[in-house]
């Protein structure tokens, strides 16, 4: 396989022969006895969208911390535009070279867009007399800055009122305002629906044409092939390859990331067992379930042993449907029942008691208590089973957690490890462990593989499939095609109504067309 790092093509918006936006060579970084980077390299050209991929623990996050000045490398060198990296600790100098837009937004929610744009730089943006901030000038400067980069956001709006997509655009504009010409995007699409992703990609291409370079970190390989021209793979803290995306088949990319020829989650497809399923009594059922203005009345039936997929963007009502099923939101009308037992609308405790398990869309916001251990997070839904008279015995908590750790192959130092110390894939497995702790009759999973690596994705989808195969009902709500391949049946939602129904043999083209509202099939 050709290593394309030495002779990259001319990137959009970059003059021929221009020095690399960033070049890292021979970078080594250790944390105690853990070797996080072992002589890695990376070259990103001006105007290029370059993917950095690898399994969790491959070294991607550590490299980003080195490239953004958060950590000093033990060995190796980093340069920007052909010049050596700034002195470590010189925050302003680093901001003028590179910025990172993280999966978890770094804007201050209670400040306005204008205040976030010029945080720590109010004086340069609109200083008034006597050292006071000139708010009118600040807002005008913010509006000019946003307009200059084509970002349609009100500078007076509170950051907490913005969509995820708008917050990302604000962070990118802020980085460019400091002079940075390299933007690191860390899982930028994890919380965006399909339309939001396309709008983000359109904006990135516009900025690339102006010479801005992007280092794109993602676990979604289809996005790499859609957006990026070059890709670098790390595995086990080492550089494996750098290549042009167009020259690299997906199977070869997966093999480079995993170190073997194991199939990706994209190879999943549920078996043809529709005949057996159709004869079983539904385990999870909804009757004319609706949420006004979000989704129209739905009659869903999910049988024991079945995985039902609900495909579509969050804006089409899919996420809201999942939240209604598990009691997080009350429906406008209709009912939910599990094994014939009605579930009280809008009641999470009653949904749990009825036998519904839930894997939420955002593990950081809804799935984990970051200050607690693996054991505490995994047993949140079964605290009533961990001791007599309402007490929780630590020994029972640890024993229960060890069982879940072994069953789900959670890579941890032990039940008492703080959950924030785990990789993204293992954090998601803890969320799954909590959902399965009560042996649910029905499992509802909303975008269950968001922000995890390929092997973890495969493992998590396998768990959902196994839950169904053992006699429960499962629902996967997602617009990720790989998530939906394990499903026996898929319903496509568009603008709150079912526009198509598919068996397990659907094609990517027809399912995407249905989700986007350009194809209907019943």
Image: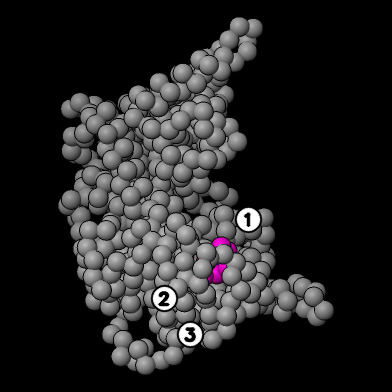
Which of pointers 1 and 2 lies earlier in the amino acid sequence? 2
Total marks shown come to 3
Q: Check the picture and name the quadrant holding the C terminus.
A: bottom left
- Give the image's coloring scheme: one colour
Q: Mark 3 falls on what kind of element?
A: loop
Left/right of residue 511 with respect to residue 145 in the rendered view: left
User: Residue at the spot x=36%, y=88% of the render?
Assistant: 277
Magenta span includes 141: no
Residue range of the region highlighted in magenta in the rendering: 324-329
Q: Position of residue 293 (x, y in %)?
A: 44, 56
Q: Position of residue 286 (x, y in %)?
A: 47, 76
**What is the C-alpha distance between the residues marked 2 and 3?**
13 Å
Is 68 located above or below residue 435 in the figure?
above
User: Residue at the spot x=46%, y=23% of the render?
Assistant: 142
Q: Which residue is mark 2?
A: 299
Q: Which residue is mark 3?
A: 283
Residue 370's disc is: 1
Q: Is there a contact, CB below 8 Å, between mark 2 and mark 3?
A: no
Q: Check the picture and name the quadrant holding the N terminus.
A: bottom left
Please name which of the two marks, 1 or 2, marks the residue nearer to the observer: 2
């Amino acid at each position: 396989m050709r290593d394309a790092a030495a002779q990259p093509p001319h990137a959009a918006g970059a003059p021929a022969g221009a020095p690399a936006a960033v070049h890292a060579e021979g970078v080594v970084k250790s944390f105690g006895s853990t070797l996080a980077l072992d002589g890695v390299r990376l070259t990103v050209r001006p105007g290029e969208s370059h993917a950095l991929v690898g399994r969790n623990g491959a070294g991607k996050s550590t490299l980003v911390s080195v490239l953004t000045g958060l950590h000093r490398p033990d060995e190796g060198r980093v340069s920007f535009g052909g010049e050596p990296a700034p002195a470590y600790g010189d925050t302003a100098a680093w901001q003028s070279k590179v910025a990172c837009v993280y999966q978890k937004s770094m804007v201050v929610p209670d400040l306005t867009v204008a205040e976030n744009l010029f945080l720590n730089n109010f004086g340069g943006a609109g200083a008034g007399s006597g050292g006071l901030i000139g708010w009118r000038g600040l807002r005008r400067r913010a509006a000019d800055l946003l307009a200059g980069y084509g970002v349609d956001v009100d500078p007076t709006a509170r950051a907490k009122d913005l969509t995820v997509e708008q917050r990302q655009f604000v962070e990118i504009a802020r980085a460019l305002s400091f002079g940075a010409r390299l933007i690191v995007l860390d899982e930028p699409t994890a919380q965006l629906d399909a339309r939001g992703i396309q709008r983000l990609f359109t904006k990135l291409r516009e900025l690339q044409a102006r010479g801005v370079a992007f280092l794109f970190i993602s676990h979604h390989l289809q996005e790499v092939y859609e957006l990026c021209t070059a890709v670098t793979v790390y595995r086990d803290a080492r550089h494996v390859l750098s290549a042009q995306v167009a020259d690299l088949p997906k199977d070869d990319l997966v093999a480079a990331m995993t170190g073997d020829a194991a199939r990706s989650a994209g190879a999943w497809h549920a078996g043809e067992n529709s005949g057996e399923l159709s004869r079983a009594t539904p385990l999870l059922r909804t009757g004319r379930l609706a949420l006004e203005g979000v989704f129209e009345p739905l009659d869903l039936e999910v049988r024991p042993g079945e995985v039902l997929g609900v495909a579509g963007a969050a804006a089409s009502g899919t996420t809201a449907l999942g939240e209604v099923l598990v009691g997080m939101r009350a429906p406008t009308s209709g009912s939910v029942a599990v094994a014939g037992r009605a579930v009280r609308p809008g009641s999470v405790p009653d949904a749990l008691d009825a036998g519904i398990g839930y894997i939420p869309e955002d593990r950081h916001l809804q799935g984990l208590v970051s200050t607690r251990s693996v054991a505490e997070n995994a047993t949140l839904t079964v605290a009533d089973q961990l001791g007599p008279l309402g007490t929780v015995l630590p020994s029972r908590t640890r024993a229960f957690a060890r069982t879940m750790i072994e069953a789900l192959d959670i890579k941890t130092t032990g039940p008492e490890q703080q959950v924030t110390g785990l990789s993204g894939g293992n954090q998601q497995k803890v969320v799954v462990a909590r959902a399965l702790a009560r042996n649910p009759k029905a499992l509802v999973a909303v975008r269950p593989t968001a922000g995890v690596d390929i092997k973890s994705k495969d493992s998590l989808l396998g768990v959902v499939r196994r839950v169904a195969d053992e006699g429960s009902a499962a629902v996967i709500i997602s617009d990720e095609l790989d998530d939906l391949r394990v499903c026996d049946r898929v319903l496509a939602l568009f603008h709150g109504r079912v526009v198509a129904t598919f068996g397990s043999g659907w094609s990517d083209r027809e399912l995407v067309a249905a989700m986007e509202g350009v194809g209907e099939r019943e």
